[in-house]
Image (cartoon, rainbow, N blue to C red):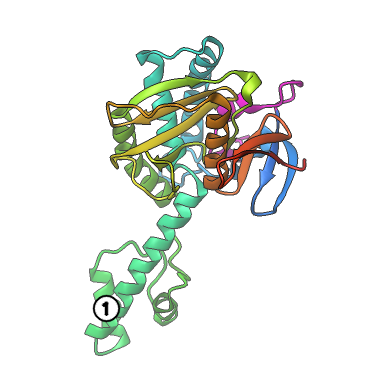
Amino acid sequence: MNARKHHYVSQCYLKNFCMTSEKTRHVFVYDKSLMRGYSSNIKDIACKRDYNRLELPNEKPDVLETSFSKFEKYIDQILQSVVISKHINDESLSPIIYLASLFHIRNPEFRGNFETSHNKILQMAAKLARSMAQSKEEQIKILKRSNLPFTSELNDETINVMENGNGYGTSLNRTVLIQAEIDVWTRVFNDLERRKWRLVKFDQCEGHLVTSDRPVVLCPRDGQCYPKYIGTGTKNTTLYFPLSCNLALIGEFENETIEIPPNNYYIAMLNSIMFSQCISQVYSSKQTFSILMENDTIQQFNTGA
Protein backbone atom coordinates (compact mmCIF):
# COMPACT_ATOMS: atom_id res chain seq x y z
CA MET A 1 0.00 0.00 0.00
CA ASN A 2 1.26 3.47 -0.85
CA ALA A 3 2.10 5.81 2.04
CA ARG A 4 -0.49 8.60 2.23
CA LYS A 5 1.24 10.82 4.85
CA HIS A 6 3.74 12.97 2.93
CA HIS A 7 6.25 15.25 4.66
CA TYR A 8 7.11 18.66 3.24
CA VAL A 9 9.87 18.90 5.89
CA SER A 10 11.76 15.61 5.80
CA GLN A 11 12.02 13.36 8.83
CA CYS A 12 15.72 12.79 8.08
CA TYR A 13 16.16 16.52 8.77
CA LEU A 14 13.75 16.84 11.69
CA LYS A 15 15.40 14.03 13.64
CA ASN A 16 18.39 16.32 14.25
CA PHE A 17 16.13 18.38 16.53
CA CYS A 18 14.63 15.53 18.54
CA MET A 19 14.69 15.31 22.31
CA THR A 20 18.16 14.27 23.40
CA SER A 21 17.06 11.95 26.20
CA GLU A 22 14.96 9.48 24.20
CA LYS A 23 15.00 7.44 21.03
CA THR A 24 11.40 7.69 19.85
CA ARG A 25 12.04 10.74 17.66
CA HIS A 26 9.86 13.22 19.50
CA VAL A 27 10.18 17.00 19.49
CA PHE A 28 8.57 19.76 21.48
CA VAL A 29 6.14 21.60 19.23
CA TYR A 30 4.82 25.10 19.71
CA ASP A 31 1.89 25.83 17.40
CA LYS A 32 1.42 29.59 16.95
CA SER A 33 -2.00 29.17 15.31
CA LEU A 34 -3.26 27.19 18.32
CA MET A 35 -1.12 29.15 20.82
CA ARG A 36 -0.16 25.99 22.67
CA GLY A 37 2.65 23.46 22.89
CA TYR A 38 2.85 19.68 22.93
CA SER A 39 5.29 16.88 22.18
CA SER A 40 4.98 14.91 18.95
CA ASN A 41 6.70 12.21 16.98
CA ILE A 42 8.33 13.72 13.90
CA LYS A 43 6.34 11.35 11.68
CA ASP A 44 3.24 13.36 12.63
CA ILE A 45 4.48 16.91 11.97
CA ALA A 46 5.19 18.99 8.84
CA CYS A 47 3.15 16.60 6.73
CA LYS A 48 -0.12 16.38 4.82
CA ARG A 49 -2.15 13.55 3.36
CA ASP A 50 -1.28 12.90 -0.33
CA TYR A 51 0.80 16.09 -0.47
CA ASN A 52 3.01 14.73 -3.28
CA ARG A 53 0.39 12.58 -5.00
CA LEU A 54 0.28 13.06 -8.78
CA GLU A 55 -2.47 12.33 -11.26
CA LEU A 56 -0.63 11.68 -14.53
CA PRO A 57 -1.36 9.25 -17.36
CA ASN A 58 0.82 6.12 -17.30
CA GLU A 59 2.38 7.07 -13.96
CA LYS A 60 1.83 5.73 -10.46
CA PRO A 61 0.31 8.33 -8.10
CA ASP A 62 3.22 7.94 -5.67
CA VAL A 63 6.00 8.37 -8.26
CA LEU A 64 7.05 11.74 -6.83
CA GLU A 65 6.87 10.63 -3.20
CA THR A 66 8.96 7.57 -4.09
CA SER A 67 11.53 9.80 -5.74
CA PHE A 68 11.68 12.07 -2.69
CA SER A 69 12.07 9.04 -0.41
CA LYS A 70 15.11 7.86 -2.38
CA PHE A 71 16.66 11.31 -2.20
CA GLU A 72 15.98 11.53 1.56
CA LYS A 73 17.82 8.25 2.17
CA TYR A 74 20.79 9.72 0.32
CA ILE A 75 20.69 13.14 2.03
CA ASP A 76 20.20 11.50 5.44
CA GLN A 77 23.73 10.05 5.28
CA ILE A 78 25.18 13.43 4.28
CA LEU A 79 23.33 15.32 7.01
CA GLN A 80 24.44 12.87 9.67
CA SER A 81 28.04 13.10 8.49
CA VAL A 82 27.96 16.90 8.76
CA VAL A 83 26.17 16.88 12.13
CA ILE A 84 28.64 14.39 13.64
CA SER A 85 31.82 15.85 12.15
CA LYS A 86 30.67 19.50 12.40
CA HIS A 87 32.39 20.03 9.07
CA ILE A 88 31.06 20.56 5.53
CA ASN A 89 32.85 20.35 2.19
CA ASP A 90 31.81 21.14 -1.37
CA GLU A 91 30.74 17.55 -1.99
CA SER A 92 28.24 17.56 0.89
CA LEU A 93 27.27 21.22 0.51
CA SER A 94 25.61 20.86 -2.89
CA PRO A 95 22.99 18.22 -1.90
CA ILE A 96 22.23 20.13 1.32
CA ILE A 97 21.61 23.27 -0.77
CA TYR A 98 19.35 21.11 -2.95
CA LEU A 99 17.42 20.12 0.19
CA ALA A 100 17.22 23.76 1.32
CA SER A 101 15.79 24.83 -2.04
CA LEU A 102 13.11 22.12 -1.79
CA PHE A 103 12.16 23.21 1.73
CA HIS A 104 11.97 26.83 0.63
CA ILE A 105 9.24 26.31 -1.98
CA ARG A 106 7.67 22.92 -1.16
CA ASN A 107 5.26 23.91 1.59
CA PRO A 108 1.51 24.49 2.00
CA GLU A 109 1.89 28.26 2.19
CA PHE A 110 3.59 28.42 -1.20
CA ARG A 111 0.81 26.36 -2.72
CA GLY A 112 -1.84 28.51 -1.09
CA ASN A 113 -0.21 31.74 -2.29
CA PHE A 114 0.18 30.36 -5.82
CA GLU A 115 -3.47 29.36 -5.96
CA THR A 116 -4.56 32.76 -4.60
CA SER A 117 -2.54 34.51 -7.32
CA HIS A 118 -4.00 32.17 -9.93
CA ASN A 119 -7.56 32.99 -8.85
CA LYS A 120 -6.84 36.75 -8.89
CA ILE A 121 -5.64 36.45 -12.49
CA LEU A 122 -8.79 34.56 -13.44
CA GLN A 123 -10.92 37.19 -11.68
CA MET A 124 -9.28 39.99 -13.69
CA ALA A 125 -9.61 37.98 -16.90
CA ALA A 126 -13.31 37.35 -16.27
CA LYS A 127 -13.96 41.05 -15.63
CA LEU A 128 -11.95 42.10 -18.68
CA ALA A 129 -13.80 39.62 -20.89
CA ARG A 130 -17.12 40.91 -19.55
CA SER A 131 -16.16 44.48 -20.47
CA MET A 132 -15.35 43.34 -24.03
CA ALA A 133 -18.38 41.06 -24.56
CA GLN A 134 -21.95 41.84 -25.54
CA SER A 135 -23.32 38.71 -23.91
CA LYS A 136 -22.41 35.97 -21.43
CA GLU A 137 -21.88 33.55 -24.33
CA GLU A 138 -19.39 35.91 -25.94
CA GLN A 139 -17.63 36.36 -22.58
CA ILE A 140 -17.18 32.61 -22.34
CA LYS A 141 -15.76 32.45 -25.87
CA ILE A 142 -13.24 35.20 -25.06
CA LEU A 143 -12.13 33.40 -21.92
CA LYS A 144 -11.72 30.10 -23.76
CA ARG A 145 -9.53 31.79 -26.36
CA SER A 146 -7.29 33.17 -23.61
CA ASN A 147 -5.76 29.71 -22.96
CA LEU A 148 -5.78 30.38 -19.22
CA PRO A 149 -5.71 27.21 -17.05
CA PHE A 150 -9.40 26.89 -16.13
CA THR A 151 -9.93 23.69 -14.18
CA SER A 152 -13.73 23.65 -14.35
CA GLU A 153 -16.26 24.09 -17.12
CA LEU A 154 -16.95 27.73 -17.92
CA ASN A 155 -20.62 28.58 -17.41
CA ASP A 156 -22.71 31.36 -15.90
CA GLU A 157 -22.24 30.09 -12.35
CA THR A 158 -18.45 29.64 -12.43
CA ILE A 159 -17.88 32.95 -14.20
CA ASN A 160 -20.07 34.86 -11.72
CA VAL A 161 -18.18 33.38 -8.78
CA MET A 162 -14.83 33.99 -10.53
CA GLU A 163 -15.69 37.67 -10.85
CA ASN A 164 -16.47 37.79 -7.14
CA GLY A 165 -12.95 36.51 -6.50
CA ASN A 166 -13.59 33.45 -4.34
CA GLY A 167 -12.23 30.94 -6.84
CA TYR A 168 -15.19 28.55 -6.83
CA GLY A 169 -14.82 25.99 -9.60
CA THR A 170 -11.34 27.22 -10.50
CA SER A 171 -9.19 25.47 -7.89
CA LEU A 172 -5.95 24.15 -9.28
CA ASN A 173 -5.41 20.43 -8.98
CA ARG A 174 -2.43 19.15 -7.02
CA THR A 175 -0.47 18.16 -10.13
CA VAL A 176 -0.55 21.74 -11.48
CA LEU A 177 0.59 23.09 -8.10
CA ILE A 178 3.45 20.58 -7.92
CA GLN A 179 4.53 21.55 -11.44
CA ALA A 180 4.57 25.20 -10.34
CA GLU A 181 6.81 24.27 -7.41
CA ILE A 182 9.20 22.44 -9.73
CA ASP A 183 9.35 25.44 -12.07
CA VAL A 184 10.19 27.79 -9.19
CA TRP A 185 12.57 25.31 -7.54
CA THR A 186 15.01 25.46 -10.49
CA ARG A 187 15.46 29.22 -10.04
CA VAL A 188 15.70 28.94 -6.25
CA PHE A 189 18.36 26.22 -6.45
CA ASN A 190 20.43 28.31 -8.87
CA ASP A 191 20.15 31.33 -6.54
CA LEU A 192 21.26 29.32 -3.52
CA GLU A 193 24.20 27.79 -5.39
CA ARG A 194 25.52 31.29 -6.15
CA ARG A 195 25.62 32.20 -2.47
CA LYS A 196 28.75 31.90 -0.33
CA TRP A 197 28.14 29.45 2.48
CA ARG A 198 29.57 28.88 5.92
CA LEU A 199 28.78 26.41 8.66
CA VAL A 200 28.36 28.03 12.08
CA LYS A 201 28.92 25.87 15.17
CA PHE A 202 27.54 26.58 18.61
CA ASP A 203 28.56 25.36 22.03
CA GLN A 204 25.72 23.36 23.60
CA CYS A 205 26.25 25.12 26.93
CA GLU A 206 25.21 28.38 25.24
CA GLY A 207 21.78 27.05 24.25
CA HIS A 208 20.25 25.17 21.33
CA LEU A 209 18.79 26.01 17.93
CA VAL A 210 15.21 25.31 16.96
CA THR A 211 13.70 24.77 13.53
CA SER A 212 10.19 25.07 12.12
CA ASP A 213 7.78 24.08 9.37
CA ARG A 214 9.62 26.76 7.35
CA PRO A 215 13.24 25.77 8.10
CA VAL A 216 14.86 27.93 5.41
CA VAL A 217 14.52 31.67 6.04
CA LEU A 218 15.76 34.74 4.14
CA CYS A 219 16.39 38.03 5.97
CA PRO A 220 17.94 41.38 5.14
CA ARG A 221 21.58 41.49 6.22
CA ASP A 222 20.90 44.14 8.83
CA GLY A 223 18.54 41.71 10.57
CA GLN A 224 16.12 44.49 11.51
CA CYS A 225 13.03 43.07 9.83
CA TYR A 226 11.97 39.70 8.54
CA PRO A 227 9.83 39.91 5.40
CA LYS A 228 8.60 36.49 4.27
CA TYR A 229 8.51 37.10 0.57
CA ILE A 230 11.89 38.50 -0.50
CA GLY A 231 13.40 36.60 -3.40
CA THR A 232 16.27 34.14 -3.03
CA GLY A 233 18.28 36.13 -5.59
CA THR A 234 18.02 39.41 -3.66
CA LYS A 235 21.35 40.98 -2.75
CA ASN A 236 22.15 42.04 0.83
CA THR A 237 20.17 39.15 2.25
CA THR A 238 21.20 36.30 4.50
CA LEU A 239 19.76 32.80 4.31
CA TYR A 240 19.53 30.85 7.59
CA PHE A 241 19.17 27.07 7.61
CA PRO A 242 19.65 25.33 10.99
CA LEU A 243 20.97 21.80 10.45
CA SER A 244 20.84 20.59 14.05
CA CYS A 245 20.56 21.89 17.60
CA ASN A 246 24.08 23.34 17.38
CA LEU A 247 24.80 23.79 13.65
CA ALA A 248 23.47 26.33 11.16
CA LEU A 249 24.23 26.87 7.50
CA ILE A 250 24.36 30.53 6.46
CA GLY A 251 24.49 31.83 2.88
CA GLU A 252 25.18 35.33 1.54
CA PHE A 253 26.10 36.85 -1.80
CA GLU A 254 28.56 39.36 -0.40
CA ASN A 255 32.25 38.54 0.07
CA GLU A 256 32.38 40.32 3.41
CA THR A 257 30.52 38.17 5.91
CA ILE A 258 28.59 39.58 8.82
CA GLU A 259 30.37 39.27 12.15
CA ILE A 260 28.79 36.63 14.37
CA PRO A 261 27.83 37.89 17.85
CA PRO A 262 28.51 35.84 21.00
CA ASN A 263 26.99 32.39 20.78
CA ASN A 264 24.09 32.78 23.20
CA TYR A 265 23.01 36.01 21.50
CA TYR A 266 23.22 34.52 18.00
CA ILE A 267 21.32 31.39 19.06
CA ALA A 268 18.53 33.57 20.47
CA MET A 269 18.52 35.66 17.29
CA LEU A 270 18.27 32.62 15.01
CA ASN A 271 15.53 31.12 17.17
CA SER A 272 13.61 34.40 17.01
CA ILE A 273 13.86 34.35 13.22
CA MET A 274 12.59 30.76 13.08
CA PHE A 275 9.77 31.64 15.47
CA SER A 276 8.66 34.74 13.59
CA GLN A 277 8.88 33.18 10.13
CA CYS A 278 7.34 29.75 10.73
CA ILE A 279 4.14 28.88 8.92
CA SER A 280 2.56 27.81 12.21
CA GLN A 281 4.89 25.46 14.13
CA VAL A 282 8.31 25.64 15.82
CA TYR A 283 10.22 22.46 16.74
CA SER A 284 12.62 22.22 19.67
CA SER A 285 14.65 19.47 21.34
CA LYS A 286 13.83 20.98 24.74
CA GLN A 287 10.74 22.41 26.36
CA THR A 288 12.25 25.90 26.50
CA PHE A 289 14.48 27.78 24.08
CA SER A 290 16.04 31.24 24.00
CA ILE A 291 14.68 34.08 21.90
CA LEU A 292 15.70 37.70 21.44
CA MET A 293 13.33 40.37 22.73
CA GLU A 294 12.77 43.79 21.15
CA ASN A 295 15.06 45.44 23.70
CA ASP A 296 17.86 43.04 22.64
CA THR A 297 17.68 40.97 25.81
CA ILE A 298 17.60 37.17 25.78
CA GLN A 299 14.59 35.41 27.27
CA GLN A 300 13.57 31.76 27.59
CA PHE A 301 10.40 30.84 25.72
CA ASN A 302 8.45 27.95 27.24
CA THR A 303 6.51 25.83 24.75
CA GLY A 304 4.17 24.74 27.52
CA ALA A 305 4.36 21.15 26.28
Where is residue 44? Give x, y as percent.
68, 38
**Outermost bottom residue:** 134
Q: Nearer the viewer, residue 164 or 29?
A: 29
Q: Is residue 146 above or below residue 230?
A: below
Q: Is residue 186 left or right of residue 269?
A: left
Q: Is residue 20 above or below residue 104?
A: above
Residue 213 shows up from this direction = no
Where is residue 31? Give x, y as percent.
67, 47
Q: Is residue 254 left or right of residue 9?
A: left
Taking the magenta stretch, the answer to whether it contains residue 24 is yes
Instruction: Label 1: state its secondary structure.
Output: helix
Q: Nearer the viewer, residue 204 or 191?
A: 204
Main secondary structure type of the part rendered in magenta: loop
Q: Please rate how many residues cluster around mark 1, counting C-alpha atoms within 10 Å: few if below 14, some from 14 to 19, many from 20.
A: some
Q: Is residue 201 above or below residue 30?
A: above
Q: Is residue 285 above or below residue 157?
A: above
Q: Which residue is mark 1?
A: 128
Residue at figure coordinates x 53%, y 35% from the top left = 270
Q: Nearer the viewer, residue 111 or 30?
A: 30
Residue range corresponding to the magenta coloring: 1-25
Taking the magenta stretch, the answer to whether it contains residue 301 is no
User: Which quadrant does the C terminus fall into?
Assistant: top right
> Quadrant of the rendered structure where residue 90 is?
top left
Q: Label 1 amino acid?
A: Leu
